[in-house]
Amino acid sequence: MNRKRNVSYIKPEDPHFLKILKKEAGYDSSNHKFDKLDNADEDFVDDEDSELPQVVVLKEGDLTATEAEAEKERIKQVESAIKADLSQKVIFKSKSNNKKTDQK
């Protein structure tokens, strides 16, 4: 029926002299296109102390570094405690076009 599905390509073998040249040159014939990426553990580590934002207290009501960390922990706990309401419908809204309102 459909011949296009049955078409396949078989790469011909390299001539003997090319095999010798590639071997002498150290040519890597493997295809690295589909190799898995090696994700370093460093990519998924939290920021170190030196990479965190610097806290500057200018006035007497500003948050200190310890208060900021405590607030982050409190926010994480609140977000983990709140569960999604699965009884409601999920509604996706399109973005509003500001160009149309600008032209009017």
Image (tube, rainbow, N blue to C red):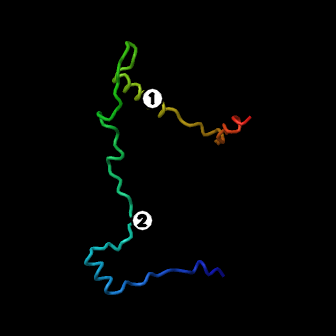
98 w.r.t. 15: above or below: above
- Give the mark nearer the N terminus: 1 vs 2: 2
Q: Position of residue 77 (x, y in %)?
A: 44, 30
Name which residue lies at 41% across and 28% down: 72
Q: Work out which quarter of the rendered image holds the N terminus and state it.
A: bottom right
5 vs 19, nearest the viewer: 19
Dot 1: within a 10 Å radius of its alpha carbon, few (fewer than 14), some, or many (20 or more) residues?
Answer: few
Does residue 89 lie above or below 35 as drawn? Answer: above
Residue 13, compared with residue 32, is above or below; it is below
Q: Check disc 1 and give the amino acid type.
A: Ile
Location of residue 97 (image quadrant): top right
Task: Tell me the number on the disc at residue 60.
Answer: none
The 10 Å Cα crowd at callout 2, few under 14, some 14 to 19, many 20 or more, is few
Res 91 visible: no
Q: Is residue 95 visible?
A: yes
Name the outermost residue toward the left.
24
Q: Which residue is mark 2?
A: 34
Tell me residue 19's x, y (percent).
31, 82
Q: CA distance from mark 1 to mark 2?
A: 41 Å
| Percent position of residue 37, x then y | 38, 58
Q: Position of residue 44 (x, y in %)?
A: 36, 45
Residue 45 in the figure: left or right of residue 80: left
Query: Which residue type carries mark 2?
Result: Phe
- Name the residue at the top extreme: 60
Q: Which mark is residue 75?
A: 1
Which image quadrant: the C terminus?
A: top right
In the picture, measured across the screen, residue 5 lies left or right of residue 50, that is right
Helix, strand or loop at label 1? It is helix
